[in-house]
Image (tube, rainbow, N blue to C red):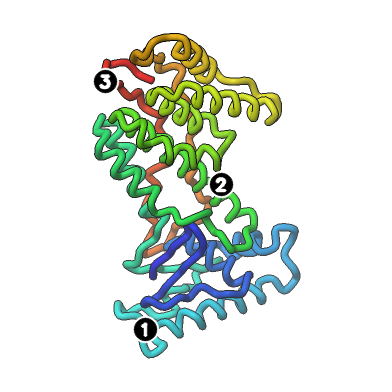
Amino acid sequence: MDVRILGGLSVRENGASVTPAAAVPRQILALLATFAGQIVPASVLMEELWPAGAPRRARHELKAYIGELRFLITAALPQGRGAGDGRTVETILAAEPGGYRLDTGRGSHDVWQFERAAGAGYRAMEAGDLTRATLRLGQALALWRGEPYAGVAAGPRLRAEAERLGASRLSVLDQWAEAHLGLGRHAELIPELALHAARHPLDEPLNAQFIVALLRSGRVEDALEVHRRLCALLRRDGGREPSARLRRLRDLLLAARHAPPRRVPAQPRALRPTRPAVSLNPGVSNAGSPNPVPPHPLSSIPAPLSVPSAAGATV
């Protein structure tokens, strides 16, 4: 079974789609696919479907929706009975004590692929291998086709997971940009950072990377305009004041505006942007699972690393 979450839900068994068109079974499948290989308690599923309180016949309705999903899976299996590896509909969508478990077998899962590639990219950054870091972090970002769970009605669990994935994506994007800047690829990085900065206008680390890329490319006025816009947006967003990182960047930009072309001065590491660690604890049981989800490698996202410039300084 192949699962795609990063840009709309797609679940395929034996090459055939088993993603329901109806909203409620689609939502159930999304939650089961999110925690594939783990037992998702019936209470968690009901909380997702009815966050304001489950109706009296909630368990009966849940069983009916599970039956609809099993019907789609059965239709996708050879001769409607079993997969080539001996799995049946009863083992693919298994009823477990207290809940249900979706077994993807040896299929792919784009979230797991994203987290494995991102973890490899972070390790490359820590080792100072910027070329490998750009490759592995770029592979992680390439798995995204749009917003996670697009087209799925999301309750509290799926909303929390979508927020977690979005935060992980931004952290990977930060490190990917950091690695490219360290390799002196600031000019070619500008179009990509411009796109992401427009999508995330209040994200300070991402916009700071954009400003640095513009500054290193000699586009001081453009960098100042991005800086002004970001500071204005931060002030409008609850009166947030520019950080020390942004104040330092402003000083560098003003100095560069009135100075002849030269290398950008070093920037203290203490002023580099950092993101809080993103919690990756889904809060559902993995006990009894014959095919547990691989551990999330991003449970503690490292702060961006200091990247040397050609002169040994950092920006």
Q: Earlier in the sequence, mark 2 or mark 1?
A: 1
Give the left or right position of residue 28, taking residue 305 as reference.
Answer: right
Q: CA distance from mark 2 to mark 1?
A: 36 Å
* Among the 4 quarters of the image, the one containing residue 98: bottom right
Give the left or right position of residue 282, taking residue 265 as reference.
Answer: right
Which mark is on residue 263? none
As shown in the figure, which amino acid type bears the numbered disc 1? Gly
Q: Earlier in the sequence, mark 3 or mark 1?
A: 1
As shown in the figure, which amino acid type bears the numbered disc 2? Glu
| Residue that mark 1 sits on | 82
* Among the 4 quarters of the image, the one containing residue 179: top left
Look at the numbered disc 1 and give the secondary structure of its residue.
loop
Does any portion of residue 84 appear in the rendered image? yes
Front-most of 254 and 156? 254
How many residues crowd around disc 3 within 10 Å: few (fewer than 14), some, or many (20 or more)?
Answer: few
Q: Residue at x 40, y 75 (%)?
A: 13
Look at the numbered disc 3 and give the secondary structure of its residue.
loop
Whether residues under marks 3 and 2 lie with C-beta atoms below 8 angstroms apart, the answer is no
How many residues crowd around disc 2 within 10 Å: few (fewer than 14), some, or many (20 or more)?
Answer: few
Q: Position of residue 83 (x, y in %)?
A: 35, 80
| Residue that mark 3 sits on | 310
Q: Position of residue 151 (x, y in %)?
A: 58, 63
Q: Residue at x 58, y 36 (%)?
A: 201
Q: Quadrant of the C terminus?
A: top left
Q: CA distance from mark 3 to mark 2?
A: 37 Å
Front-most of 286 and 238? 238
Mark 3 or 1: the one toward you = 3
| Residue that mark 2 sits on | 163
Does any portion of residue 300 appear in the rendered image? no
